[in-house]
Image (tube, rainbow, N blue to C red):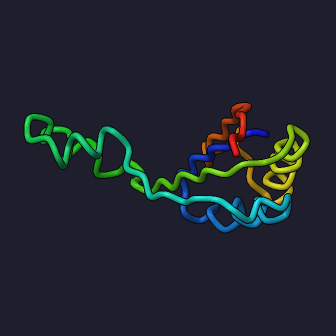
């Protein structure tokens, strides 16, 4: 079993990636709204308020998806499904996908 974590940086691709997850049968996932560290510091820690001007044009969108899949082949299928949806991660940084082998305790 593998834990898959996907960071999505552009809102317009969110639906594509969610569709790719359902294509491989990953129907149980958790989606969390994220905030990058620079924005968190600039707007929540007064000493870093000077960073605000620099962040005006940086993307603020970030969703983090956590799910479990049974095997490595499912991860390969997920990556192919994402590519088939038209996302070119080499041309534009749309997402980061990581996975880790985990042990399920019942």
Q: Nearer the viewer, residue 93 or 65?
A: 65
Q: Quadrant of residue 60?
A: bottom left
| Residue plotted at (59% across, 65% down) | 12
Task: Name the spot of residue 7 as percent of width and height, x first.
Answer: 57, 47
Which residue: 70% across, 59% down? 17
Query: Would you place residue 56 above or below residue 18 in this image?
Result: above
Q: Position of residue 88 (x, y in %)?
A: 74, 47
Judge whether 78 appears above or below 99 on screen: below
Q: Is residue 48 left or right of residue 4?
A: left
Residue lying at the far front of the rendered structure: 106
| Front residue (pair 67, 48) | 67
**Front residue of 12 and 99:** 99
Percent coordinates x, y for residue 35 in the rendering: 37, 50
How many numbered marks, from 0 up? 0
Point out the residue furthest to the left here: 46
Horizontal and vertical percent position of residue 55: 29, 46
Identify which residue, 105 or 68, lies in the foreground: 105
The residue positioned 70% from the left and 36% from the top of the image is 99
Give the residue at x 55% y 56%: 10
Q: Is residue 11 above or below residue 8?
A: below
Q: Is residue 3 above or below residue 67?
A: above
Q: Quadrant of the N terminus?
A: top right
In the image: residue 52, left or right of residue 11: left
Q: Residue 81 is drawn in which quadrant?
A: bottom right
Left or right: 30, with 3 as reference point = left
């Amino acid at each position: 079993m593998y834990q898959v974590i996907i960071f999505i940086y552009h809102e317009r691709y969110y639906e594509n990636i969610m569709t790719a997850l359902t294509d491989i049968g990953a129907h149980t996932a958790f989606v969390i709204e994220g905030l990058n560290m620079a924005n968190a510091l600039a707007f929540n820690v007064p000493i870093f308020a000077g960073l605000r001007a620099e962040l005006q044009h940086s993307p603020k969108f970030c969703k983090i998806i956590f799910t479990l899949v049974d095997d490595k082949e499912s991860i390969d299928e997920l990556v192919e499904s994402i590519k088939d949806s038209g996302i070119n991660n080499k041309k534009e940084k749309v997402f980061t996908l990581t996975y880790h082998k985990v042990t399920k305790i019942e």
